[in-house]
Amino acid sequence: MVGDKGKKLKVGERGEDENAEHIDRDLVLSIEKLQKIQEELEKINEEASDKVLEVEQKYNERRKPIYDMRNDIIKFIPDFWLTAFVSHPAFLLTEEDQKIFKYLSSLEVEDFKDVKSGYSITFASNFKPNPYFEDTKLTKSFTFLDEGTTTISATPIKWKDGNGIPDGVAHEKNGSKRSHAE
């Protein structure tokens, strides 16, 4: 038999196909073991998140009376919330917004506790009597769901005559009606 003497199989050695099959089997077993470990880690991470949430909720309850005391003091500082919003780099208030914000007396943020199905943040704004709308309290809620969608709900504003922005968007008044497409 003519053949390459260097390629003779010794006892205990495997051929190429057999070796590849062994490596593939080892790889699959390793991946399965890794996946089980990852699942254990995810359980621990979920438990940790639940515990962190419990602690945050506990301290949010403790913060609430402090926030209330702070809000009581802020009410005596003229244009506090207007100044805070105008000074913040993330907020851009129009001149009309600024006129309305002069009447904002307090702002409350409420976190909803159910983070398993998403979470909500509600902003409640309390207003002093003003020439723009009848409401003394306006709320806007943002609900962030796990699948990445956000729902927004807000109390409708009861505008006083001659005030208000139709559909929340300022439209130019040129004497003609806007089309439905707009």
Image (spheres, rainbow, N blue to C red):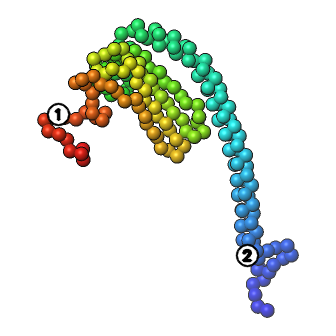
Q: Quadrant of residue 48?
A: top right
Can residue 97 be seen here?
Answer: no
Q: Left or right: 163 with respect to 134? A: left
Measured in 3D between alpha carbons, the distance from the residue under mark 2 to the one under mark 1, in whole angstroms, is 82 Å
Residue count near mark 2 (Cα–Cα under 10 Å), binned few <14, some 14–19, many ≥20: few
Does residue 87 lie above or below 153 as drawn? above
Q: Residue furthest left?
A: 175
- Picture coordinates of residue 167 (x, y %)? 30, 35
Q: Residue at x 72, y 71 (%)?
A: 20
Does residue 58 lie above or below 176 as drawn? above
Q: Residue at x 57, y 40 (%)?
A: 117
- Picture coordinates of residue 60 (x, y %)? 58, 22
Q: Quadrant of residue 153?
A: top left
Mark 2 = which residue?
16
Q: Tell me the element at label 2.
A: helix
Q: Tell me the element at label 1.
A: loop
Residue type highlighted by circle 1: Lys
Q: Nearer the viewer, residue 27 or 101?
A: 101
* Circle nearer the N terminus (2, 1): 2
Can residue 19 be seen here?
Answer: yes
Mark 1 = which residue?
173
Q: Residue at x 43, y 36 (%)?
A: 152
Q: Left or right: 27 with respect to 69? A: right
- Picture coordinates of residue 158 (x, y %)? 33, 25
- Picture coordinates of residue 165 (x, y %)? 27, 30
Residue type highlighted by circle 2: Glu
Q: Quadrant of residue 127?
A: top left
Q: Nearer the viewer, residue 145 or 59?
A: 145
Does residue 92 lie above or below 45 as drawn? above
Q: Residue at x 50, y 38 (%)?
A: 144
Residue count near mark 1 (Cα–Cα under 10 Å), binned few <14, some 14–19, many ≥20: few
